[in-house]
Amino acid sequence: MKPHHLHHLPTTVVTSTRRHYATKYTAKVTSTSPSGRSLSAEVTALPSSPYPTDTRGYPIPRRHVVCKATQILLNNHNNNQSHPSASSSSPSPFLDLSDYLHSLSLPITPTEASEILKSLNHPSLALSFFRLCPSISPNFQHDSLTYTRLFLILSNSPSVPNRSHLVRSMLSEMDRSNTRGTISTVNILIGFFGNSEDLDLCISLIGKWKLSMNPYTYKCLLQAYLRSYDSDKAFGVYNEMRRRGHTLDIFAYNMLLDALAKDQKVEQAYKVFEDMKRKHCEPDEFTYTIMIRMNGKIGKADEALALFQEMLAKGFSPNLIAYNTMIQALAKGRMVDKAIFLFSKMVENDCRPNEFTYSVILNVLAAEGQLGRLDEVVEISKKYMNKLIYAYLVRALSKLGHASEAHRLFCNMWNFHDKGDRDACRSMLESLCNAGKTTEAMDLLGKIHEKGITTDTIMYNTVFSALGKLKQISHLHDLFEKMKQDGPSPDIFTYNILISSFGRAGKVDEAIKIFEELENSNCKADIVSYNSLINCLGKNGDLDEAHMRFKEMQEKGFTPDVVTYSTLIECFGKTDKVEMACRLFDEMLAEGCYPNIVTYNILLDCLERCGRTAEAVDLYAKLKQQGLTPDSITYTVLERLQSGSHRKVRFRRQSPITGWVVSPLR
């Protein structure tokens, strides 16, 4: 019948429930109009699905099948995990599942397989079940739902080996079976992959499967490019979103801003920032912090401050990160007054400064020569000043080389707190020793116990080392006796420092005495102990004893190292015993101990002083063959070789441009 005749048909409203037929049903309906004309229509009802369906006709997974299949799989898996030896001899873990599924009147559907996959919390088990589904149920074929489910499982399982290879092979399977995914499939794949090449593949799937990108897809793609540190492509995706009228949430906006700011793409960052305000996505304190940090890094402290004030005007309360970022921007701009003022506001607003806050202020005060204002900073934050902060400031000042300021601050801590801080005391001792203030260091070492801190070997060794370098032998003696009397016990480092220190001061007998004391103690001499003693003996003229100690250390099982050989070669060379020096050098090579540039310089100098020019040239060639880089001392010796000057006392000619005149032999 033609369409314009449809109004002649009676209009009937029928309400019925869905009926399921086991076979095909065909009926003929005939209608007769008052004019005598009749109309016949044949109605055919196809057999409905034997599976339960929802109101739209989609199959509903059978919960009892899903639960039972999941239980069988998990029980088998858990049993195999508990008894690995039994699992190797037992039949396939999927045999029970296969028996159960074959007992069903209807095979499982892809929807039910997807639900089973969802219920399995073991990625490897889910993958095995996925692969086995076609063989368990006849005519079973994976669809976009099961593929998507497995993609999601793999994306959440970073421990699965070769995940990327598995996903790519599954995509190939989908292609071969003409299975098209959904936009959800693409979204999951975008989140899974992390580099531009794979993301291009995801984008190609959208066209291949005839899909349309939704706002969430754009967001996933943008975040994926950000994770792969490609802010250019991320910004391109953002522009495409804007063109299509899509917007981001505050989290995604901040991610994009942070990436652009770190790449110093200032113009693009400001464009996104302004878009946020126009698109009714109000920037939050994190947004402002990102923009402030970006401006601070490029030296635009005024712009950073304007953003900070805008943030305050909008009612945001800056957190620790925001304050630190703004103070850092002001410090970079050398705005000391504003940095300290903001610091005071930070404390006033009950935002507790941390070590980073103090380090930024400390560095700018040091750079601007205003360390005297550190007392002002301490006074401002006195309600937050504790041992940890004092200790940090002492360590920081010590590292910056400001021993006097560190000591003054340490004394403040000492006066304000009944208990001391071990790290602060160690740092203070080290700072005083590095500055040559050994009297103050020894005084501090003697008073540390007053603050409930027991002195340790590290503290004593720090002071011993400083006293030794300054050749303050009497103090060294007294402090060592105090250590032995009051504790702690000396360790191997203590003995080695003392041997070296006495040797440096020419106190050979004292060095030998300490070495013997070491051998009789609970500590045992090591290679450093022997090297220190040999150096002491050799450089103070007792070459025979030095060589004897060299033989002794070998007999005791110590293998001489490059320091041992270099020390002896230098000692023999300086006493014109060139043959012995050369013999030791050859022995060194034969023992597989490779000389360094210091060793070569020592022997080169020895040969040059004795006028053995040809041997020196040959030695230089060996040095080059070994791949060592000559230094200024090497070139100075070579210059003397070229000039032919073999005097015992030489004067080095200095170049006004490069320092020492060097002319390497060719």
Image: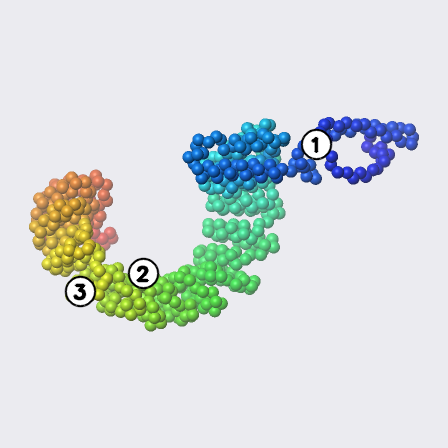
Q: In the displayed structure, would residue 144 be above or below residue 263?
A: above
- N-terminal of the pair, mark 2 or mark 3, is 2
Quadrant for residue 503, please give it. Answer: bottom left
Q: Position of residue 235 (x, y in %)?
A: 53, 46
Cα–Cα span, label 2 and label 3: 31 Å
Cα–Cα span, label 3 and label 1: 102 Å
Q: Return the mark for residue 399.
A: 2
Classify mark 2: helix, strand or loop: helix
Q: Position of residue 148 (x, y in %)?
A: 56, 38
Q: Would you name the residue on which mark 1 appears?
A: 48
Q: Would you name the residue on which mark 3 appears?
A: 481
Query: Residue most toward the right?
Result: 35
Quadrant for residue 37, please give it. Answer: top right
Q: Amino acid at mark 1?
A: Ser
Residue drawn at (78%, 39%), measured in percent from left and top?
Answer: 15
Residue drawn at (18%, 52%), measured in percent from left and top?
Answer: 525
Residue drawn at (54%, 44%), measured in percent from left and top?
Answer: 220
Q: Return the mark for residue 98.
A: none
Q: Amino acid at mark 2?
A: Lys
- N-terminal of the pair, mark 3 or mark 1, is 1
Judge by depth and name the residue closer to the eye, 103 or 650: 103
